[in-house]
Image: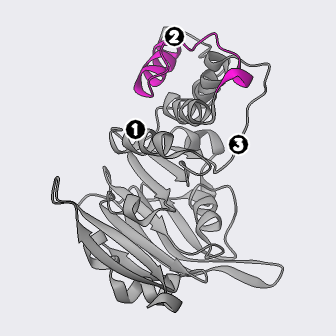
Amino acid sequence: MNVPILQARHLTRSIRGRAVVRDVSFELHPGENLGLIGPNGSGKSSLLRLLAGLQRPDSGEVMLKGDRLSRLPRRQIARTLAFVAQSQEASERLTVRQSVALGRTPWLTVLSPWGPADEAAVQKALSAVGLQGFEGRDWESLSGGERQRAHIARALAQEPELMILDEPSNHLDIHHQMAVLDLIAGLDVTTILAVHDLNHAMRCDRIVCLLQGQLVALGTPQDVLTPQLLREVFQIHARQLTDPRDGQLIWRFDSLEKV
């Protein structure tokens, strides 16, 4: 039986006496695209930071490829796992290539300095996100969508087996939202991402739903995204419609007051 690439085991974390993650457990399998949904303040970002090893749980454990994350050196973690924050910046004095090249840091040592393999990894990452020809552009000249693609390229340059992304399409216009989500869906890497738009969540293999820090549902989009759950978790009335063009199911939402 294949070992899960990532396991959350009874994760709990409190901030100033308030539990933001409560006894969360699940497994992530190689090649999976796992979506994380929940209302604002449900603990999505806190959970992702625990999974990435950026915060320590008060209790519970994260397992990375069968090993305790808390016992692994940061360099070893960074060679397996890459984290893309909801909002992050790079120095405006950096070029796109320099920013993406930072993703090679976990692989560089005194005995293994920058070489052809590192250059190839950077070029492959830039190509994967469609930023060929942007290498010399200053960071400050990039649009929001281009910056987000560059952040993903930097994560890809780490050559990780797993990418954790915190609402990667947040603050982007609809065109760039679709471009970034299409990009992530096409990556040859295991992913877990917090998703704000529930129609976007339909594209995931499985979904984890959080409410007040607790895992309240886990399964395929068809199993998790039901009118009853969406009413209880998001306080909305939801109904599914069929797109006549391709038969795709889409959600339509109304406030409970209008029903």
Q: In the image shown, does 110 or 146 lie closer to the viewer?
A: 146
Label 2: few (<14), some (14–19) or many (≥20) C-alpha neighbours in 10 Å: few
Split into 4 quadrants, where in the image is the N terminus?
bottom left
Identify the residue position indicated by label 1 in the image.
183
| Residue stretch in magenta | 117-142
82 relative to 248 in the view: left or right? right
Query: In the rendered image, is residue 100 in sight?
Result: yes
Q: Position of residue 73 (x, y in %)?
A: 63, 46
Between residue 183 and residue 111, name the one nearer to us.
183
Q: Amino acid at mark 3?
A: Gln
163 and 112: which is toward the camera: 163
Q: Is residue 134 magenta?
A: yes
In the image, taking residue 72 as reference, residue 13 lies left or right, namely right
Q: Residue at coordinates 34% horizontally, 76% vertically from top-left?
A: 225
For this orientation, the residue located farthest to the front is 258
Question: x, y (%) of residue 65?
Answer: 42, 54
The residue singled out by tag 3 in the image is 88
Q: Amino acid at mark 2?
A: Gly
- Give the distance between the C-alpha atoms of the residues marked 2 and 1, in whole angstroms: 18 Å
Helix, strand or loop at mark 1: helix
Mark 2, secondary structure of its residue: loop
Residue count near mark 1 (Cα–Cα under 10 Å), binned few <14, some 14–19, many ≥20:
some
Of pointers 2 and 1, the one earlier in the residue sequence: 2
Q: Earlier in the sequence, mark 2 or mark 3?
A: 3
- Residue 133, which numbered label? 2
* Mark pair 2, 3: CA separation: 23 Å
